[in-house]
Image (tube, rainbow, N blue to C red):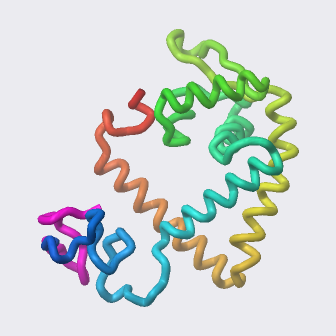
Amino acid sequence: MFLEGDEVPHAGRLERRRQSDIGDVGVPAGTTGIAEPASSSSGRPPPSASSTLLSDYLDQQLRRDAAMTHADYSLLARLSVAPDRALGKSLLAEQLKFTRSRLTRAVIRLEESDYVRRREDPADGRGQLAELTEAGMELMAKAAPGHATAVRRVVFDALSPEQVEQLATITATALASLKQADEEDSYPSALPWHRR
């Protein structure tokens, strides 16, 4: 969201927004809310649209087929590939970009279903590990094939082999940029896993 006086990218440079350029909700008039270069007025949807739709589609698929959320699937998937199927809760929160309270609620909910158990971290007397149980591993074994099929169906089956290669290159570039920005721009109190 941009407000009057904010600097926003425009045609390769920063410009200050005037009130006449801003819609009722603080979004520049005539845009989707994402600062896009003037040359990108091709009518293509912003990248965030596909991210939002894909996340929603996968969440619905997992709720329908495995009675779990996409966030819970991501948590269980991280544990399933970890050594001894266990991770420290702080590291797990960092990997998932969850606040500590969100992770605690998710772990408690999954623990009540016997998919995860909490135990003391022997390397850190104050910390806890979240550990995937046998029931959790069985749930993942049942959920993973349908989840992979859903991803393949809506992403990879719709792309040519050349587009899959392009997507891999674009994704790798975007991830590297995001990691660099995270290292340069973040401050500890702003990080989700440091918040309660």
In the rendered view, tell whether residue 101 sits above or below residue 191: above
Q: Position of residue 188 (x, y in %)?
A: 32, 35
The stretch drawn in magenta includes residue 15: yes
Residue sitting farthest toward the top:
125
Measured as percent of width and height from the top left, residue 101 is found at 49, 27
User: Viewed as shown, does residue 18 lie left or right of 182?
Assistant: left
| Residue segment shown in magenta | 1-16
Of residue 6 and residue 89, the one placed in the foreground of this image is 6
147 falls in the magenta region: no
In the displayed structure, 97 sits above or below 14; it is: above
The quarter of the image holding the N terminus is: bottom left
Where residue 178 appears, as percent x and y from the top left, is: 42, 57
Residue drawn at (69%, 80%), measured in percent from left and top? 159
On screen, residue 47 versus residue 30, left or right, reads: right
Q: Reply above or below: 187 against 27.
A: above
Residue 103 position by quadrant = top right
**Residue in the image at 29% along x and 50% along y:** 185
Task: Evaluate whether residue 84 shows in this view.
Answer: no
Give percent across and percent down for residue 86.
Answer: 68, 28
Q: Residue furthest front?
A: 24
- Residue in the foreground of this view, choosing between 128 and 108: 108
